[in-house]
Amino acid sequence: MSNHKRPEVDARLARVEGHLKAVRTMVNDDRTYPEIVHQIAAVRASLDGIIDVIVEDLVEDCVATAKKGKSVASTVVELQQVVASSR
């Protein structure tokens, strides 16, 4: 992962971590099922956003590699694997 995306990913992960702790508290406080599920769905959406940032970084890396005239085959395979595993 490139250094310019790392702080954004780290900040997003910290928010997700805090959100998950809040969900755990909700479960322990016997909050309603709909409230808990709604918050878990929000965590999942946040994780999807993190995946988007990582994939965007990988695409940028692939384009940069191509612009340098280097082979992008391994980066394209990596991109395909990342996208496939994120589904």
Image (tube, helix red, strand yellow):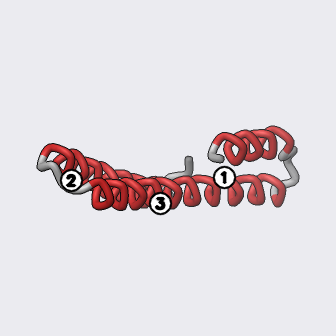
Give SS at disc 1.
helix
Give SS at disc 3.
helix
Q: Identify the residue under disc 3.
A: 45
| Dot 3 or dot 2, earlier in sequence | 2
Query: What label does residue 58 carry, if any?
Result: 1
Q: Position of residue 18 (x, y in %)?
A: 25, 53
Q: Identify the residue under disc 2.
A: 22
Query: What label does residue 82 carry, if any?
Result: none
Q: Nearer the viewer, mark 1 or mark 3?
A: 3
- Which of 51 and 70 lies nearest the eye of the viewer? 51
Amino acid of disc 1: Leu
Residue visible at 36% across and 61% down in the picture? 38
| Dot 1 or dot 3, earlier in sequence | 3
Q: Position of residue 4 (x, y in %)?
A: 50, 59
Characterize the local packing of mark 3: few (<14), some (14-19) or many (20 or more) Cα atoms within 10 angstroms. few
Characterize the local packing of mark 2: few (<14), some (14-19) or many (20 or more) Cα atoms within 10 angstroms. some
Q: Position of residue 5 (x, y in %)?
A: 50, 58
Residue visible at 52% across and 56% down in the picture? 48
Q: Position of residue 40 (x, y in %)?
A: 37, 53
